[in-house]
Amino acid sequence: MKSYQELLRLNKEWAAQKLKENPGYFKKLAKQQKPQFLWIGCSDSRVPANEVTGTQPGEIFVHRNIANLVIHTDVNLLSVLEYAVEHLKVKHVIVCGHYGCGGVKAAMSNDDYNQVLNMWLRVIKDVYRNNRTELDAIADINARADRLVELNVKEQAEKLCKTSIIQKAWKERKAPYIHGWVYGLGDGLLKEIISIKPDFDSIDPIYLYENI
């Protein structure tokens, strides 16, 4: 197991290697960031956004939380979303879950994880309740959890469209596109679950904002 000192040592080696490959690497990177993508992913340490997409620092703006949830009262997520959409002008927002998600599996149980985590996982329990017929018909518990991962990603992607942040951007510049993906821990591949183009018809009228 690596100690924190080991991480600092490895950082020095990484920085030195980058400078060896390109002496102006960090100077160029420090000047600006113009990512085209916002990644809303799970906090799981096995799903690093840059590595699984083969992108470099500066190409993806990242927000992560347990089970990649989009909660309309989460100021942390909304501030990231607003900055990425309104100021960085990202062209795509990706919600990425992963098979074998511990948060999803925990939400499927009736265990008490204490108040804060119970409150967080309740969002996933709601996804289960709204899809109970389909999920209860899946006998294998792991297959059922994987399907809930997919349904959760779909739900969170659709929630983004209900925000005034996304709706304002759609009105002003016909972007960003919204995507829901799932990452496979066993094969390293990303699976597309849903893709939503800038289209107000995809939103239930009760969630539409006027005069934005």
Image (cartoon, rainbow, N blue to C red):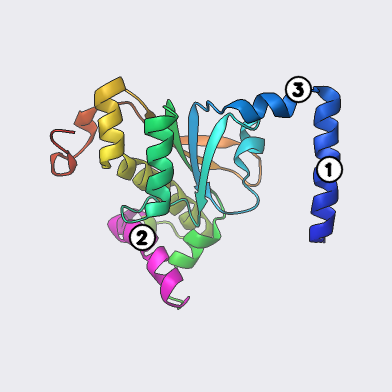
54 lies left or right of 198: right
Q: Amino acid at mark 2?
A: Val
Badge 2 vs badge 1, beta-carbon distance below 8 Å: no
Numbered label attached to residue 43: none
Which comes before the other along the chain, label 1 or label 3? 1
What secondary structure predominates along the stretch shown in magenta?
Answer: helix
- Quadrant position of the C terminus in the picture: top left
**SS label for mark 3:** loop
- Write down the residue under mark 3: 24
Badge 1 vs badge 3, beta-carbon distance below 8 Å: no
- Quadrant position of the N terminus in the picture: bottom right
The magenta stretch spans which residues? 113-134
Residue lying at 32% horizontally and 41% vertically, measured from the top left:
158
- Write down the residue under mark 1: 12
Q: Amino acid at mark 1?
A: Lys
Q: Is residue 143 magenta?
A: no
Residue 21 percent location from the top left of the image: 83, 23
Q: CA distance from mark 2 to mark 3?
A: 45 Å
Q: Amino acid at mark 3?
A: Gly
**SS label for mark 2:** helix
Numbered label attached to residue 123: 2
Q: Relative to the observer, which residue lies in front, 107 or 19? A: 19
Which comes before the other along the chain, label 2 or label 1? 1
Which comes before the other along the chain, label 2 or label 3? 3
Residue 68 percent location from the top left of the image: 47, 50
